[in-house]
Amino acid sequence: MGKVQKPKNRARQQTPKFVKNALASVADASDSEFFQRLRAIKFPPGTSKSDLSLWAPILDRIDGFLQHACRPPSDGVVFHSVASEQRGRLVDALRFSARLLEHTSNRTAYNSIEHLLELLHVGTVEILELTLCLLHRVVRASSMSREHGTVLRSRLAALANGWGGAAAGFPMADMCAGEGCGSALPLSGGNVHFEYYEEEGALGASSDASGGGGGSGGAAEERHVLDIPNVSQFGKSAEDIFGSILETRKVPLAVQQPLLMRLRLAIAFASLSARRTWTGLQLRAFLVLMRHQSYANIRAPPTDADMAADIAALLELDDPSVPVSLRALGIQTLSAMCHVMSMQASVFV
């Protein structure tokens, strides 16, 4: 992505002592030691925020690691795997970056947006959650290019839509309700119905769990349909099933990510804890999109009203087993939606 840009007034800018100490602690660290030492860096309470660009040596090293960690397995495949020996380091890098952004100013100096967008392809829940949290901190403040904004919206669309919500027969409240607290869910939530067209970029994919909908591509030559029932009963990961599909079908790169996300959601449907986890990720994805829309003055899609009603029903759910963190995400998302809608009322009316 490139080096962190140093501020033009750097000569007049004093580097706080704790920043100097932190930079010195990792200056001569090997790759394995570097990530261990990141965990040991503390931000003294009560100190003023330092300029993010002062941390350039650490940020540039993390950027180089992310560039290596985000490589796809082969050409023509969107899924990114992370080697087991790299996973711990990646988690450390993302956690430190989030802490650093919380305690610094001038977030426009952040230089790894492109790699975060690549990490949205990774299937590990922990990495995906950390990536979404980090994107939430930088997506509005950063000087995100129009191209990166387009990529962000396309890669988060399938996750933000989840199982389709109440309109598709999968209300968020029922998806997260414990036994006896919600309505019965359609069994089709564990199925995958996916439509695409042979010509790359011509997408007609069903985005709801019931398999309804589906569009048509502009200059599509041939329509393809995937119907895979009871995906969770395969005993395989979404990535393994995805790989098997690619062995027999030429799925355009442009539609691989939505397909992979549909497989992940179908597998998660069978477990209440998994549904709650992925609902949390859905809310985080929607929250990132709301923040980006607020930053870029993009008109919110009409489905926002449906999403707001869905989240409100989740918050009203009388079920003490619903995690407090999930309810908090719902409140945060609703607040962001209200903020975006109030801004649009003044910008577009």
Image (cartoon, helix red, strand yellow):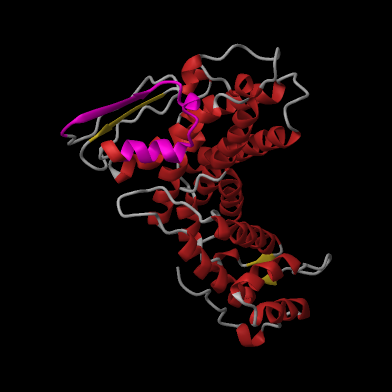
In x, y percent, where is residue 347?
A: 49, 43
Number of marks in picture: 0
In x, y percent, where is residue 121?
A: 46, 48
Is 223 within the magenta?
Answer: yes
The answer to whether residue 254 is left or right of residue 54 is: left
Q: Residue at x 59, y 64 (%)?
A: 107
Please, is residue 245 above or below residue 99 in the view? above
Question: In this orientation, which residue lies closer to the viewer: 187 or 45?
Answer: 187
Question: In this orientation, which residue lies closer to the viewer: 345 or 107?
Answer: 107
Q: Residue at x 21, y 35 (%)?
A: 218
The answer to whether residue 189 is left or right of residue 178 is: left
In x, y percent, where is residue 100?
A: 67, 64
Q: Residue at x 70, y 12 (%)?
A: 180
The picture quadrant where one finds residue 227 is top left
Is 121 within the magenta?
Answer: no
The N terminus, quarter of image:
bottom left
In x, y percent, where is residue 132?
A: 57, 48
Question: In this orientation, which residue lies closer to the viewer: 324 or 36?
Answer: 36
Please, is residue 202 above or below residue 191 in the view? below
The answer to whether residue 238 is left or right of residue 58 is: left
The picture quadrant where one finds residue 260 is top left
The stretch of residues the image draws in magenta is 221-246
